[in-house]
Image: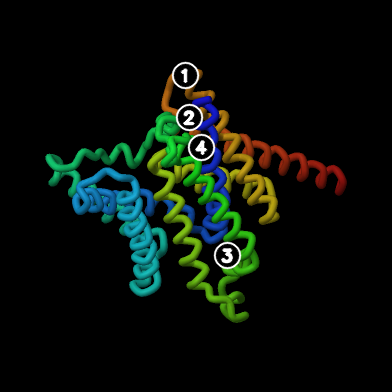
């Protein structure tokens, strides 16, 4: 039963990351998830210092504030300071993460926190962090309910906002000309990315969140030119990677998050190899037809 909950949490994070990652990939902003996942560290530390509690609610609030702040900072640097977006992302997340590391180092006697827990998480603890109702009913792992709700929120957001997301991702100038608020949809998407990163890193860590935001979407992008198919395939790839990664970790007795990330990389390489092979066959077929 423990394996089921662990895989389910991994699959939920994968599905959330795959959907949002598909739009980030189309906008050439995939590394913003990396920026947010590192930049939330000072928010976690400050929340602990202020509240003197490791309650996850306070941690999540602090992390969410800094996640959104990072998104705004990246936008200001790229639009107002006219920095390239990748440079703005690099400056923002390294600065924020460094502040978090310094805070932990400075208050090391008062803080029972480790930056590694933010980066790597521990998905194996999922079955033991349960939600108990007032009458003693065990509802199962808390993170399953949190991430399940997040997945439904993302599905609803994409379903009702699909046209606007499509226009602003492929042709923001045309979208603006037709009256669509490009800035609004940008911040709406970035807020969801920030929320996904913050809610996920407690279970799986920042590294795996980044992998799920980038890998499945990039793999799907290689083998289809249709956005609906890309969204569906990216979710399938993400869920499959979480299943294969878990059993790989059991087999080698290694890191679960690391094994899931390796599974994502293998999927991408297989898709890349398939595309290269398919292109060669297609070109060979054209060559034979001509001659």
* Helix, strand or loop status at disc 4: helix
Q: Cβ–Cβ below 8 Å for labels 2 and 1?
A: yes
Visible residue check, residue 273: yes
Binning the other alpha carbons within 10 Å of mark 3 as few (below 14), some (14 to 19) or many (20 upward) gives some
Q: CA distance from mark 1 to mark 3?
A: 41 Å
Q: Is residue 143 left or right of residue 247?
A: left
Q: Crowding at label 2, few (<14), some or many (≥20) Cα neighbours within 10 Å?
A: many
Residue drawn at the location 63% of the way across and 41% of the way down: 236
Image spot of residue 119 (x, y percent): 35, 40
Mark 3 — residue? Answer: 169
Q: Quadrant of the C terminus?
A: top right
Spatial CA distance of label 3 from label 4 is 27 Å
> Residue at position x 87%, y 46% from top?
289
Whole-Å distance between the Cαs marked 4 and 2? 11 Å
Look at the numbered discs 1 and 4 and tell me whether their residues touch, using CB distance below 8 Å: no
- Pick whichever of labels 2 and 3 is earlier in the sequence: 3
Measured as percent of width and height from the top left, residue 235 is found at 61, 44
Q: Of callouts 1 and 4, which one flags the residue occurring earlier in the amino acid sequence?
A: 4
Return the residue at label 1: 252
Contact (CB < 8 A) between labels 2 and 3? no
User: Residue at the location (32% across, 37% down)?
Assistant: 117
Whether residue 98 is visible to the viewer of this picture, yes or no, is: no
In the rendered image, which residue does mark 4 sit on? 10
Numbered label attached to residue 259: 2
> Dot 1: what SS?
helix
Which marked residue is nearer to the observer: mark 1 or mark 4? 4
- Lower sequence index among marks 2 and 1: 1
Element marked by disc 2: helix
């Amino acid at each position: 039963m423990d394996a089921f909950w662990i895989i389910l949490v991994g699959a939920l994070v994968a599905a959330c990351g795959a959907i949002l990652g598909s739009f980030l990939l189309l906008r050439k902003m995939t590394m913003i998830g990396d920026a947010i996942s590192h930049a939330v560290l000072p928010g976690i530390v400050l929340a602990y210092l202020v509240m003197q509690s490791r309650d996850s609610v306070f941690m999540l609030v602090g992390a969410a504030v800094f996640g959104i702040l990072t998104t705004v900072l990246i936008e200001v640097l790229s639009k107002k300071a006219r920095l390239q977006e990748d440079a703005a992302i690099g400056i923002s997340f390294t600065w924020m993460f460094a502040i978090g590391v310094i805070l932990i180092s400075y208050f090391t006697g008062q803080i029972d926190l480790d930056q590694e827990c933010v980066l790597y998480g521990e998905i194996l603890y999922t079955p033991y962090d349960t939600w108990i109702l007032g009458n003693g009913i065990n509802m199962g792992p808390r993170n399953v309910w949190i991430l399940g709700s997040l997945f439904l929120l993302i599905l609803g957001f994409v379903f009702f906002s699909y046209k606007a997301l499509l226009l602003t991702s492929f042709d923001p100038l045309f979208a603006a000309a037709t009256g669509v608020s490009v800035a609004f949809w940008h911040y709406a998407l970035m807020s969801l990315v920030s929320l996904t990163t913050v809610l996920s890193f407690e279970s799986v860590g920042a590294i795996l969140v980044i992998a799920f935001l980038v890998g499945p979407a990039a793999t799907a992008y290689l083998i289809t030119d249709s956005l609906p198919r890309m969204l569906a395939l990216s979710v399938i790839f993400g869920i499959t990677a979480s299943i294969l990664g878990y059993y790989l970790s059991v087999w080698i007795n290694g890191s679960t998050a690391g094994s899931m990330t390796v599974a994502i990389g293998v999927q991408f390489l297989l898709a890349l190899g398939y595309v290269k092979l398919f292109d060669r066959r297609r070109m060979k077929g054209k060559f034979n037809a001509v001659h």
